[in-house]
Every structure is written in structure tokens, then in C-alpha cells.
Image (cartoon, grey):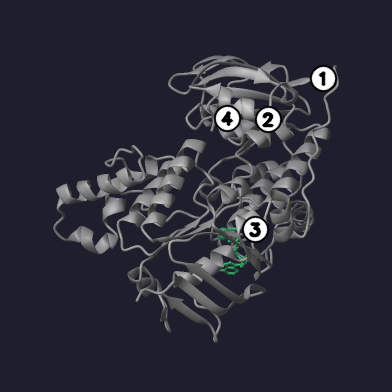
Amino acid sequence: MMSEKTIELKNISKVYPGVRALDTINFEIGRGEVHCLVGQNGCGKSTLIKIMSGVEKPEPGAEIYINGELCKHLNSHISMSKGVQVIYQDLSLFSNLTVKENIAFRDNIRKKSLFVNWKEVDKIARKALELIDVDIDINAKVGTLSIAQQQLVEIAKALTGDLSLLILDEPTASLTGKEVRSLFRVITNLKNKGISILFVSHKLNEIFEIAEKVTVMRDGKIIGDFTPSELDHDRLVYLMTGMRELYKQPKPIGNDYEVVMEARNLSKNKNYKDISFKLKKGEILGITGLLGSGRTELALTLFGMNPYDSGELIFEGKAVKWTSNREACAAGVGYVPEDRLNCGLIMNQSIEDNLTITTIKSYLSRFGLINSGERLKALNTKVKELGIKFSMPEAAVKTLSGGNSQKVVLAKWLLVNPKVLILDEPTIGIDVIAKNSIHTLIKSLAENGMSIIMISDEVQEVLQNCHRILVMSKGRIVFEFTPDQITDKELLEKFNLA
Ligand SMILES: Nc1ncnc2c1ncn2[C@@H]1O[C@H](COP(=O)(O)OP(=O)(O)OP(=O)(O)O)[C@@H](O)[C@H]1O
Ligand SMILES: [Mg+2]
């Protein structure tokens, strides 16, 4: 007889130096159930997942049952062989291998050295991708794909094994609306086959859409299990945080404003075309549009990393043609990339050092910030402002929870205090309250004269935080408006952004 429960955890605790990441957790997932795990950054969600997958060991006294069977010495091999597959928050693909190799070689290295039946490999990869209904070149190197595509490859890979529980740690953080839809279809299909799904997300509307059961965590403990009908957005936020969200539109900019940055018919072959806009001092300018609309390429140009072919870029009244980010940085432009975990941080180094490395090091020293006493003071202020949760500044960034490591990248730029700060998807993977505090922080930076370009897929995020919004599609600006001119629904429908 198959157990009614796919997994059951009793009395789970986990202690890391300086933190009790999990505190006497009892948790279970029913067969064929879509179960969501929610809570603020650092509350222990990924740690709980690592215990289920055998990657981390709980403190003594714990009991873990998979499909009704007590697993005394769970390790990742046993967990996988019992059908528990995890898609981790930080992707674990081999970027120098192709899509099909990543999907088909579960025991990657070993099988590769043996005879490879490429026809079979092609077939496995095609079938897996078909299951999630996405069109990705199976011969492409994974390293050349967007994060969204990499995430989909990772999901496809999990589907090739034995599956009784699929765990997705923030799978939708970097997916667009369309990709999320197809992922949810996959989840529903798997559920109908009796497979259980555990899903972590900070996007609360997704939770209401897909979950049958919601478990709320706070500070390493479980607050409770709920059905979505027992919850609404505000109640859920309150359960997760003990706080309520506060929204505030940005303060309007007066009529006699300075223009800090201006683009005049900027074009770059295959990236974007005829881009013109003026960025005012103290303005928060939103740029939205679908993945592949050219937003990131444009952002890179504004940061000196992707030279334009024609047109003009004016910075503080002078035409500039930066050839490196160093020049843009020295002029006073900062950039927080979308792919923060790969571009923005050195995982093995300390949090403290990560805040003050590389490109900005010289820049910081010009302001005397590299002086270590000053540095710690400035660091402490930012950490407090952003609510970064960690045990000590000397700890390596890789010990931080996902959302908290993103905040470190943000903090790093805020220490520099640039004139123009470009934020590419600034709140991906960040919990609601931290998101709220980042938005508040962005607005206060703007009020103090910083100009901000906020690139975001999330229509609500740009509507609630920007003075003005540009919509990009296929490399062009197709629409410009202020938040009072359109509702989120109209915006989604008009530009097919959902
Ligand atoms: N290897 C580790 N060493 C030390 N501390 C750790 C380690 N892994 C996690 N922690 C700490 O355990 C706590 C829980 O982290 P976890 O990654 O489980 O959070 P999370 O709920 O997944 O957060 P997020 O939403 O940001 O991903 C955090 O305080 C984190 O800093
Ligand atoms: Mg996590």
C-alpha cells in the first residue's frame, strides 16, 4: 500500500554557527498535493528543503519518512532514489555542457566517459522539453542561455528521473508570465499523475493560484498550515512577518528639473533601436516589457558595457561614449544586474569584502570609504536599512539565504551613492516586506537627488514606484506613461505582458 503522505518530517532542527535555521519542525506533504512554503528571506525554507533532499543533516532526534518509510541516514543519493527531485534556488547546471547533455546525463561525469548513444540523448532531451512545452535548442551550451531558459532546462532534467516529490525552490523568480503559465501547466499535469509538488515563492499571487496547502514559516519555525481559502494577501503577509505592507507613491518632481542623462535615438544592431528618453534628477524611471525586449542590453549600454552603434548619450550635459563600465562608474553610474548571484558576488568571500570589491574599489577609495573603520560603519548602516540577516560580516556570502545575498549586491552599490543607479529586476527573490523596504529605500534615494532606472517585469512594481514608465518591445520604446494614466490590468492586456 502506498502511503498517503509523500514525505513526513518530525522534530527537525538545524543549527549553523550563530543561527538556529530550523527549530523543531513538523511537516508533511500529501500525495499529489501542490504545497507551497512561504516566509521571509532567511526563515529557513531552503534549509528545510536541503534536509528533505539529504544534502544537509538535521540535529539528532529527527525522523524523516519518505513514502511511509523511515529514512535513518538520508543522503542525497537515497533521497533521489526515492523520487525526491529538487530544483535549487541557485541553479546547478553545467554551463559548459549542452542542453541535451545536462538533461540526459543525470550522473553527469561518469556516463559521459562511456559510450554515448546520442540518438537516445536527443530523444530524452526532446521529450523532457516537450513535457514542459518549451522550445530551446538542445545543442546550445547552457552557459549561453538566459536564466529563465536555464531554469526550464533544470526542470526538464528533474522530469527525466523517478519522481514522487518535485521540490522547486523559487522556480519562477526569473521567469516571465508566459513561462510561469507553462510551468503551472506542468505542475498540474504532474499532480494529476499523483506526484507531489513543493513550491517556494515570494510572489504571493502565484501561491493563491496554484497551492492547495500553504505552510507559513517564520524564524525557523512553522507558524501554521493553511488552505488558500483561509488566507488572503494581507493575512498571509501578516502571518509571514507580523507586519503590514505600506505603499507610498514617489514624491512628485517639481517643474524646474535638471536632466541627468539623455538618450537621443540610441541604436545598437540586434539589441535596440531609436531609444530616446530624458532622465531627470531625482526621477524613478521604470522600464518594463517582455524578456528579450532589449531592456537589459540598453541598461548595459547606459553602464558603458555594450557600446551603441549610433545616436547620442548625454550625461550631465556632455555627449559621452563610454567604452567600459569603469568609465561609466567613474562618471557616477551604478548598475545592479539581474543575474546578481553570478555577476554581482564572489560567493566564497566574506559579506564585508563583497560589499567593497572590484569595479567600485577605486571609486570607493576616492571617497575614503575603503578605510576599514569607515567601511564597517557604512556597511552597518546599509545592512540595517535593507534588513540583511546574517550572523557576522566575516561570514562567506554563500552562507546567506538567497534573498539576503541579493540585498548585499544592492547595498554594495548604495554605499557608492551614484548619480544614476540602474536596477535590473531589483526585487527578484526578495520577500514582501524586504521588497517593501527596498522600494521605500529607492524612493528616499530619489528624494535625495539620485536618479533611478528601474527595469522590471512586474507591472505592479513599476506602477507603484516610478514617476514615469517606458514600455519596450522588440528593442523599441513603444509606449510612455505616468502611473495615473493606466491600471495594471490595462497595461498587462495592452502589451500582452502577462
Ligand atoms: N551553510 C550555512 N552556513 C551558515 N548559515 C547558513 C547556511 N545556510 C543557511 N544559513 C542560515 O540559515 C538561515 C536560513 O537560511 P535559508 O537559506 O534556509 O533561508 P530561506 O528561507 O531559504 O531564505 P530566502 O527566501 O532568502 O531564500 C539564514 O539565517 C542563513 O543565513
Ligand atoms: Mg532560499
Which quadrant holds the N terminus? bottom left
Question: Mark 1 — residue?
Answer: 257
**Numbered disc 1: secondary structure:** loop
Residue plotted at (39% across, 40% down):
145
Compute the Cα span from label 4 to label 3. 27 Å
- Check disc 1: other Cα within 10 Å, few if <14, some if 14-19, many if 20+: few
The disc, 3 or 1, on the residue closer to the chain's N-terminal end is 3
Marks 1 and 4, the one that precedes in the sequence: 1
| Front: mark 3 or 1 | 3
Q: Which mark is residue 41?
A: 3
User: Which residue is under mark 4?
Assistant: 299
Q: Using the image as rendered, state which of residue 443 and residue 65 is in the foreground.
A: 65
**Marks 4 and 3: which is nearer the front?**
3
- Residue 15 x %, y %: 61, 77
Q: Position of residue 186 (x, y in %)?
A: 40, 48
Depth check, mark 2 against mark 3: the one in front is: 3
Q: How many marks?
A: 4
Q: CA distance from mark 1 to mark 4?
A: 23 Å
In the depicted view, which residue is nearer to us: 310 or 270?
Answer: 270
Q: Quadrant of residue 398?
A: bottom right
Q: Earlier in the sequence, mark 4 or mark 2?
A: 4
Amino acid type indicated by mark 3: Asn
Question: Which residue type carries mark 4?
Answer: Ala
The one nearer the camera, 484 or 398, is: 484
**In the image: residue 396, left or right of residue 231:** left
Lower sequence index among marks 2 and 3: 3
Residue at mark 2: 331
